[in-house]
Amino acid sequence: RHIPIPHAIRDRLIELLKQKIDAGVYEPSNSAYRSGWFCVVKKDGSSLRIVHDLQKLNSITIRDAGTLPSPDDFSESCAGRACIGALDQFSSYD
């Protein structure tokens, strides 16, 4: 279902999409699958949030039956080692 973009936020949305493309967060795809999306204004009233509808993609995703390691097991495996972590602050929570 297509959700129209309000005219009042159209220019800001285009700029946000350009930023995400330039940063490599969004890239062109020739996939047979695509996700619907829409945009809302955040509670602060000044920034935008892009919301993706991943229901169709999730329906064809092969589920991994494995479980994630417990935080204790994971931290023990890192004990005594130099750990490097990265966090995507640009688009982590839009």
Image: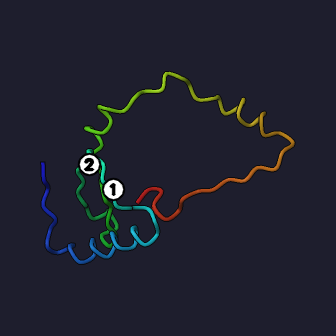
The location of residue 80, given as percent across then percent down, is: 87, 42
> Cβ–Cβ below 8 Å for labels 1 and 2?
yes
Task: Work out whether mark 1 precedes mark 2 in sequence or the reverse, and give the earlier one.
Answer: 1
Q: 67 left or right of 12?
A: right
Q: Secondary structure at mark 2?
A: loop
Colour treatment of the image: rainbow
Q: Which residue is mark 1?
A: 29
What residue is disc 2 on? 34
Which quarter of the picture shows residue 4? Answer: bottom left
In this view, which residue lies farthest toward the right? 80
Q: Amino acid at mark 1?
A: Ser
* Image mark count: 2
Vertical order, 91 against 78 (above or below): below
Q: Nearer the viewer, residue 23 or 83?
A: 23
Residue located farthest toward the top when viewing the structure as drawn: 65
Q: Find numbered disc 1 in the image and state the secondary structure of the residue it sits on.
A: loop
Q: Position of residue 45 (x, y in %)?
A: 30, 70
Where is the C terminus found, in terms of image quarters? bottom left
- The amino acid sitting under disc 2 is Arg
Dividing the picture into quadrants, the one containing residue 49 is bottom left
Is residue 32 positioned above or below 66 on the image? below
Q: What residue is shown at x 21% (from left), y 73% (from top)?
A: 9
Residue in the image at 74% along x and 37% along y = 75
Q: Is residue 83 left or right of residue 44?
A: right
Seen as rendered, the residue at the extreme front is: 30
**What distance separates the C-alpha of mark 1 from that of mark 2?**
9 Å
From the viewer's perspective, tell me whether residue 83 is left or right of residue 69. Answer: right
Asked if residue 53 is positioned above or below residue 23 in the image, the reply reads: above
Q: Residue 33: x, y in percent?
A: 27, 45
* Residue in the picture at 48% in, 26% down: 64
